[in-house]
Image: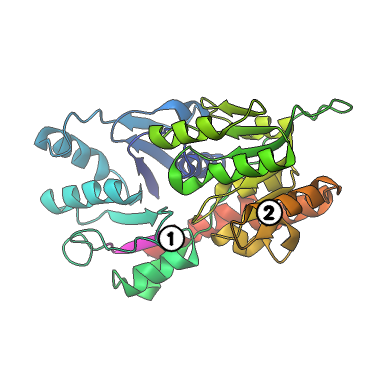
Amino acid sequence: MKILQVIDTLDVGGAEKVFVDMCNILHENHQDVTALFLLEGGILKKNMHAGIPFYELHRNGKWSLKSMYKCSTILKQFDIVHCHSTHVYRYVRLISRLFSLKNTRIIFQNHHGIIAINNKVPLFFTSILKPDYYIGVSDLLIQWGIHEMKIRKDRTFLLENIIIKQEIIKKTGILKPYDLLLVSNIKENKNQLLAVQVAEKLDLSLLLVGKVQDEKYNAVLHEASTAKVAFATDCDNVQPVLGEAKLGLHTSLYETGPLVLIEYLAQGMPFLSYETGEVAKMLKPYFPEYFIDNFDCGQWAERVTKLLSQDADTEKMQQVFEKYFGAAQYFNKLIAIYQCIKN
């Protein structure tokens, strides 16, 4: 079975990290996997296994017939074409229509994080571009695919996000430079301002890690920040940074993952997160103290104070990580989906 993973480029982001991990897991399990970048590899490409073949389309215009034809010659070589994100799937599906790629199974994997807020179905996704096969990373996305796009239940698949745990050498006996840390690209729906307010209320230091995606919101954060708030906007590998702080935060208004909670878990880092997404739903029964259902600064401050005064149960965190987010379980789920689709 020849598998092609398709994305536009590998900037720093949750879907991009999932793409890299998926390719690496398939390769490490001796699957015939290739990557296709509609633009170019991007900053996270260096995290892919060197043995994974890849194409970079470098398309000049989205609707260039020359680029579309070149892409079609690549697509037809594969049994499974796994598209990540709406715009990538739309492009690939249109090419399959124009160039009659009848023997290739095309999958749309939806990483959309704001489906609870904006559940509008993309144009033509219930007609000529309707997905034959659909993967959602949360139950909410699965239900959206079934009820809004009218995809058959037997062609929809739930595949929760994972991350690959990195073995980080822990420094013992050294004070952590920050009290709090938050990992999210900087934009309004990630709600980093709440973390800044909590840190100020408690007179704690805070490290904000993430690429700036909203300059106006970034300016708001800087204006509200004290000298104890630091920014790391060029970090493309989060897990080694987690040892820099005592407690992780996640303040996003809505998520499908969120992937960073798995990274906190993998490194045994206690955290406080707003209750949103599939990962939160999975982890809350094990760590109810790590989740909160509101954005009240006072209540967040109280919970942060409590968590900082306690020792994290790192052994339990490792057990839960291996149970739900291990690479072996992920590979088995993914390959079962492919086999179901191919057969």
* The one of 119 and 224 positioned closer to us in this rendering: 224
* The one of 127 and 291 positioned closer to us in this rendering: 291
Q: Please give the label number shown on residue 247.
A: none
- Left or right relative to 119: residue 225: right
State the image coordinates of residue 40 (x, y, percent, origin top left): 33, 28
Q: Is residue 333 magenta?
A: no
Name the mark nearer the viewer: 1 or 2. 2
State the image coordinates of residue 316 (x, y, percent, origin top left): 80, 54
Q: Secondary structure at mark 2?
A: helix
Kind of residue sitting beneath label 2? Gly
Judging by the rendered image, the residue that carries numbered circle 1 is: 136
Kind of residue sitting beneath label 1? Gly
Q: Residues within 10 Å of mark 2 (few under 14, many from 20)?
A: few
- Left or right relative to 81: residue 43: right
- Left or right relative to 74: residue 171: right
How far separated are the C-alphas under marks 1 and 2?
Answer: 35 Å
State the image coordinates of residue 49 (x, y, percent, origin top left): 52, 31
Labelled pair 1, 2 in contact (Cβ < 8 Å): no
State the image coordinates of residue 96 (x, y, percent, origin top left): 19, 51
- Left or right relative to 90: residue 168: right
Judging by the rendered image, the residue that carries numbered circle 2 is: 298
Q: Quadrant of residue 8?
A: top left
Secondary structure that dominates the magenta span: strand
The magenta-colored residue range is 131-135
Can I make out residue 342 in this image?
no
Q: Residue at x 52, y 39 (%)?
A: 24
Q: How is the image coloured?
A: rainbow
Q: Residue at x 85, y 47 (%)?
A: 309
